[in-house]
Image (cartoon, rainbow, N blue to C red):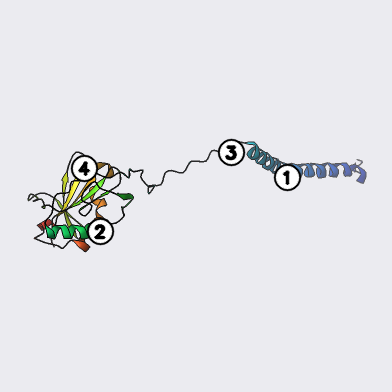
Amino acid sequence: MDQITSSPDEKAPARRNRTNRGAALLATLIAVPVTVAVAGFTFAKLAPDAPTSQPSPSASAARPQSTAPVEMAAPALAERPATVCRALTSQLPDAVRDLRQRPVTAGAEQNAAYGDPALTVACGGTEPTPGQTDDVWVVNKVCWYAAEGPDATVLTTLDRETAVRVTVPRTYGAALQWVSPIADTVVATVPSGGTAPAGCSG
């Protein structure tokens, strides 16, 4: 039987077809990612910018507040309490946290006020007498008694020669967090006196 053999010229087209297919496949593999990248870039350029979120107000942003004098009573004080109170008010800070000091209508030598609504400091008078089960608190080495009212908490010292009262409006939250800088001034200017309640000693 005669064997049929292919001549070199007959094999050449087969090799060219395989080469062409390989080249086409390679071109496709390269073209697809490039097309996707170009399309993505074009979309990004044409798409409207995404809205950016507005910064939230800072927790430490200054509170808007009145600078009008705060109405406060100024009862007459004996010589010694008056001297102690003058020392206290002269050393009080210009601000309590973010509350700036405001003028008072009477007794600047014994009263002070901060913020709006006003947190007030009043020096002089008598200390309260807490009940046996009433809570007392020590803040920066000063013993305080808290009397809760409908609109404010009144914190009064229990271990000082002259009583100091700090009235904190309820809108400011926990009252004790506001008395730290005031307590530091109390320690520096108002001598301790009397016997502190058991909850404040030891």
Q: Earlier in the sequence, mark 1 or mark 3?
A: 1
Q: Nearer the viewer, mark 4 or mark 3?
A: 4
Q: Nearer the viewer, mark 3 or mark 2?
A: 2
Name the residue type under label 1: Ile
For the residues marked 3 and 2, what is the alpha-carbon distance in whole angstroms?
A: 56 Å
Q: Are marks 2 and 4 in contact (CB under 8 Å)?
A: no
Find disc 4 in the rendering and name its residue.
Answer: 152
Say which element carries label 4. strand
**Which residue is tagged 3?**
49
Q: Position of residue 100 (x, y in %)?
A: 32, 50
**Which of 37/58 is in front?**
58
Foreground residue among 156 and 68:
68
| Crowd band around label 1 with a 10 angstrom C-alpha radius: few (<14), some (14–19), many (20+) | few
Residue in front for this viewpoint, 122 or 176 = 122
In this rendering, the label closer to the viewer, 2 or 4: 2
For the residues labelled 2 and 4, the Cα–Cα distance comes to 25 Å
Q: Is residue 132 left or right of residue 166?
A: left
Return the x and y of residue 7 as percentages of the image width and height: 92, 44
The 10 Å Cα crowd at callout 2, few under 14, some 14 to 19, many 20 or more, is some
Residue identifier under label 1: 30
Q: Does residue 159 appear anywhere in the picture?
A: no
Cα–Cα gap, marks 2 and 1: 81 Å
Cα–Cα gap, marks 4 and 3: 49 Å
Horizontal arrangement in the rendering, residue 93 relative to residue 141 (left or right): right
Query: Can you say whether 10 is above or below 176 in the image?
Result: above
Cα separation between marks 4 and 1: 74 Å
